Amino acid sequence: MSRMIRFVSVLLLLSAFAAAQQPHKKRVAVLDFDYGTVKSSIAEIFGGNEDVGKGITDLLVTKLVTDGNYSVIERKVLDKILAEQNFGNSDRADNATAAKIGKMLGVDAIIVGSITKFGRDDKSKSFGGLGVGPRVIGGLGVKKSESKAVCGISARLVDTTTGEILAAVNGAGESKRSGSSLIGGGAGSRGGGVGGFDTHASNFGQTLLGEAVMQAVEDVGGKLDQSADKLPSRKSEYSGVVADASGNTLIINVGRKAGVQVGDKVEVGRTGKVIKDPTTGKVLKTLSVKIGEGTVTEVDQDSATVEFAGQGPVKVGDSVKTPQ
């Protein structure tokens, strides 16, 4: 039994060491992209307003998560902050506001951007004969609108501490094919009549517009990946207490929301002398005695697992903090 315990302890230490060697992914949030400059094109294609910014943002988030260079915060967490703070769409595009939102979320950077091009490439082809296409020109022939789809995206990576733009990238996409409908079957030369802009639809990538959008997202996402190393490395400072202690495995009451990351080194201490103001009784300082150190091996939103190495034994209520 003692051999088994030692074996398990060695495995835990090795896994903690391996986790500490892995570089920390930089945490980012992606705000819905602005699409104000392409609203006329959207109305022409869909017959009304469609939030293409949100749809393209969803695709970009999936791209960044799949590539693995960033840790991307969940949309529901971002939406909650935006709802609480009541930031307008125009305010979010401002670098200072974006940095403020990022600080509230506890991320290293915020990605903001806009859709700069969306729709058809405005080329057309003429065909001889009568009654073949949607438009008859002077009774002599038919001009059938047949275009490629195009999409352009611009994005900025904003430092949440300084508001500095760390990277500004552009992505572009163009469909390989041409056609009279950009968004699928049943559409006329204007490309409408097929429904809204749904990037989650199973056939989205097979439409002309889908081809262009996916290519633009791949382009801008790849360039953002290349900019990941421009984000400065920061050491989060946090403190908490031990919520559970099972041998050398500790559960602490702070997690990802406080900035805890796998591989972090923490100091474990025990409360000692409490110094109070003799006139008011207010606690001025609490002295703690260091009893050891630990390495974070797992992180949840509100808690983390620490592998302890020190004199011990650790007790529930002992303090945990980042080393000074």
Image: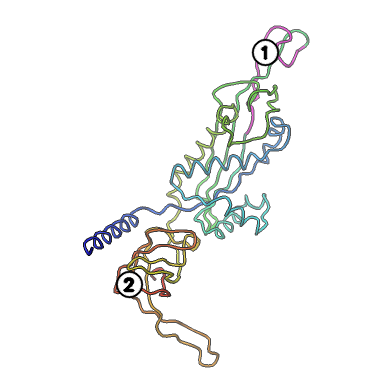
Q: Is residue 6 found left or right of 119 in the rendered image?
A: left
Identity of the amino acid at label 2?
Answer: Gly
| Vertical side of 50 occupied by 10: above or below | below
| Vertical side of 155 occupied by 104: above or below | below
Q: Residues within 10 Å of mark 1 (few under 14, many from 20)?
A: few
Q: Is residue 175 magenta?
A: no
Q: Residue 87, how many percent across, how many down?
A: 66, 55
* Image mark for residue 126: 1
Residue at the right extreme, as displayed: 138
Q: Residue at x 44, y 81 (%)?
A: 286
Q: Residues within 10 Å of mark 2 (few under 14, many from 20)?
A: some
Q: Residue at x 72, y 9 (%)?
A: 141
Q: Nearer the viewer, residue 133 or 242?
A: 242
Q: Is residue 136 magenta?
A: yes
* Image mark for residue 292: 2
Q: Residue 96, how many percent across, how many down?
A: 60, 56
